[in-house]
Image (cartoon, rainbow, N blue to C red):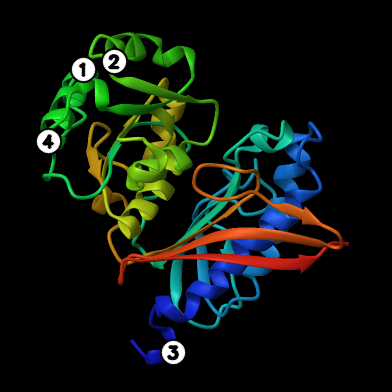
Amino acid sequence: MSDATEFHDRALSLGLARVAEQAALASAKLIGRGDEKAADQAAVNAMRTQLNLLDIAGVVVIGEGERDEAPMLYIGEEVGSGQGPAVDIALDPLEGTTLTAKDMPNALTVIAMGPRGSMLHAPDVYMEKLAVGPGLPENVVSLTMDPAARVMALAAAKNCATGNITVCVLERPRHEAMIAELRTTGCAIRLITDGDVAGVIHCAESETTGIDMYMGLGGAPEGVLAAAALKCMGGQMWGRLTFRNDDERGRAAKAGITDLDQIYSRDEMVTQDVIFAATGVTDGSILAGIKRELGFLTTETILMRSKTGSVRRMTYRAPSH
């Protein structure tokens, strides 16, 4: 492979940060306006425009959905100038469309990039997810454990009482039984309304966020994005696809999934070095949201590289129009 087509993550990282920033800025005027679709489309348009300025031969492997359902940034769409390294791109132009429309915390623009073939082509189905932060014994918890056992195992590894463990869970009716079981351990539960990429990232910075573990059913594409973030920040994650009907199993087959029961580790979802960028849209526990000043908008972006384990936080001020 020639030098021109190698995946130089350092050279590409600032360009990726700009993609996330511009998507966030495009959605800024729609914060609190009650229009989820408009906010999402603004972020999609801006992200696509910026991606096409990068010297990459990119393919969207985690995107807005199938081609017929998503006019832009659909799965399989080619982006970039076509010159440069062949890369996989996983993105959520606006994670938390409802959060943005209602001006609620933790809306983000999210994107990850790695060498071609490095990311799981997760179909648009549910994934059972489990994540913990760095510095713990390998496989300290697992998807084969019941929820209460996970809390007890994690408390033992952290040498603390189960009452000192906080678990992040997406607030959905499907999680009521799991939440009830978690309550029996005495652990705290942080319920979030949307944004399970942010929920998983919380585990990697438990001293800041107060969250020790994430678990529950959420979108499989978001699972791959979260795995990319944890690969940069450290931490363990597992995912198992779940299917409600034959149509969803068909989506998995189309994506090349042959073992429908496989449990994927973090490094099986993202197999090579990756770069990850996210920009805050609304204020959250990971990133500050977009700030309005007289004549300016200011964003905060987190930019991470798994190769070096570096985590960079950047502010960007742009004139408001």
Tell me which label, 2 or 1, sits earlier in the chain: 1
Query: Which numbered tag is attached to residue 182?
Result: 2
Residue 97 lies in what quarter of the image?
Answer: top right
- For the point 78% across and 41% down, the residue is 38
The picture places residue 163, in percent across and down from the top left corner, at 25, 20
Q: Earlier in the sequence, mark 3 or mark 1?
A: 3
Helix, strand or loop for disc 3: helix
Q: Amino acid at mark 1?
A: Ala
Element type at mark 2: helix
User: Label 3 neighbourhood size at 10 Å, few (<14), some (14-19), many (20+)?
Assistant: few
Taking depth in this image into account, of 4 and 320 the one nearest to the observer is 320
Eye-nearest disc, 2 or 4:
4
Work out whether mark 4 precedes mark 3 in sequence or the reverse, and give the earlier one.
Answer: 3
Residue at 56%, 60% (x, y): give it.
Answer: 301
Residue 157, numbered circle: 4
Decide which of tag 1 and tag 4 comes sooner along the chain.
1
On the image, the x and y values in percent for residue 24 come to: 67, 54
- CA separation in Å, label 2 and label 1: 5 Å
Disc 3: which residue: 4
Which quarter of the rendering shows the N terminus?
A: bottom left
